[in-house]
Amino acid sequence: MTIRDIIECIDGKILTSECDMEQNVEYGYACDLLSHVMAKCSPNSVWITVQTHLNVVAVASLVDIACIIIPESIDVEKETLDRAEKEGITIISTGLNTFEICGRLYDMGISPCP
Amino acid sequence: MEYTYNVEAGNYALAGEASSSIKALLKKLGISGDIVRRMAIAAYEAEMNIVIHSKGGCLILKISPEELILISEDRGPGIPDIDLAMKEGYSTAPDEAREMGFGAGMGLSNMKRCADEFNIKSTVGIGTKVQIKIYLK
Ligand SMILES: Nc1ncnc2c1ncn2[C@@H]1O[C@H](COP(=O)(O)OP(=O)(O)OP(=O)(O)O)[C@@H](O)[C@H]1O
Ligand SMILES: [Mg+2]
């Protein structure tokens, strides 16, 4: 699955510029507690969270997360987007809620992090 | 080789910079991806504990052909009951940290899980020192 497929699947919109739409994504994880994400999220995964501050990018970058999805059209701070662009992490926004996003991605073949 | 990274208490905007530098350095040295990842996770948890729970401190990274050593040292309140602090789910993180998604009470156990050796010493009213080793061989 690519980031392009994911965006299509969840009616998403890319918030970061210069992202690699063909980047491969295999796994998914949804959680708003950062230490859980550090412990459980695999490389090349998509992470769904309502957190939008700078530390989200630090966590994603440290564990090589490919892409972050922000549900319910929640606003994302400009500093967060700037940092994500610098780190090469894609941030996607969608009007769907976390439950709906997970359901759609699961159906599409994104697996839970091993 | 030895590298020191200062970590400021309470500065959430800067938080993660020390661990990012450590990760970038280890990658540049050609250390295997799995080990880089384990050290990055441990360093981030240590860094965030200094930011959230202490009055400031530093991370020290020591690199030898045999092993990586990470030392996290801070001035601060210290930890009165280390067994309790090590329990997953136990946290005294303040509300401002919890609102940002910290305070799951998983950081110290994440560090231990990523390490081949884990040591923690703390003196109430003085500070906390955590040392981990990751073997390269
Ligand atoms: N450097 C430190 N100085 C003082 N107390 C600390 C320090 N590190 C940890 N503690 C204490 O140990 C508890 C558990 O730490 P741990 O890192 O496991 O969880 P947390 O920081 O509360 O939450 P999380 O790491 O999941 O965001 C902390 O809530 C705090 O009470
Ligand atoms: Mg912690």
Image: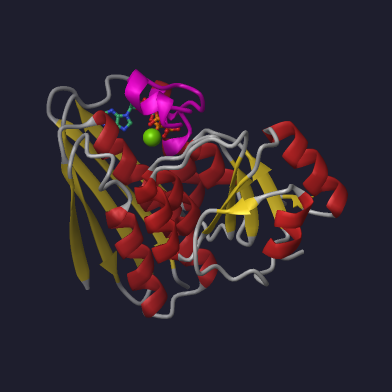
Magenta stretch encompasses residue B92: yes
In the rendered image, residue B65, in percent from the top left (x then y), is placed at 35, 77
On-image quarter of the N terminus of chain B: bottom left
- Residue A83 is one of the magenta-drawn residues: no
Instruction: Between residue B29 and residue A70, name the one nearer to us.
Output: A70
Residue appearing at x 28%, y 39% in the figure: B12
Tell whether A68 sits left or right of A29: left
Question: Residue B133 appears at what percent x and percent y?
Answer: 38, 57
Residue shown at the point (25%, 37%) measured from the top left: B51
Quadrant in which residue B136 is drawn: bottom left
For the residue pair B20 and B92, the one nearer the viewer reads as B20
Relative placement, left or right, of A73 versus B81 is right
Q: Please, what is the dominant secondary structure of the magenta stretch? A: loop
Q: Is residue B110 left or right of residue B29?
A: right
Q: Which residues are magenta?
A: B85-107
Extreme residue toward the right, this view: A107
Which quadrant of the picture is home to ligand 1?
Answer: top left
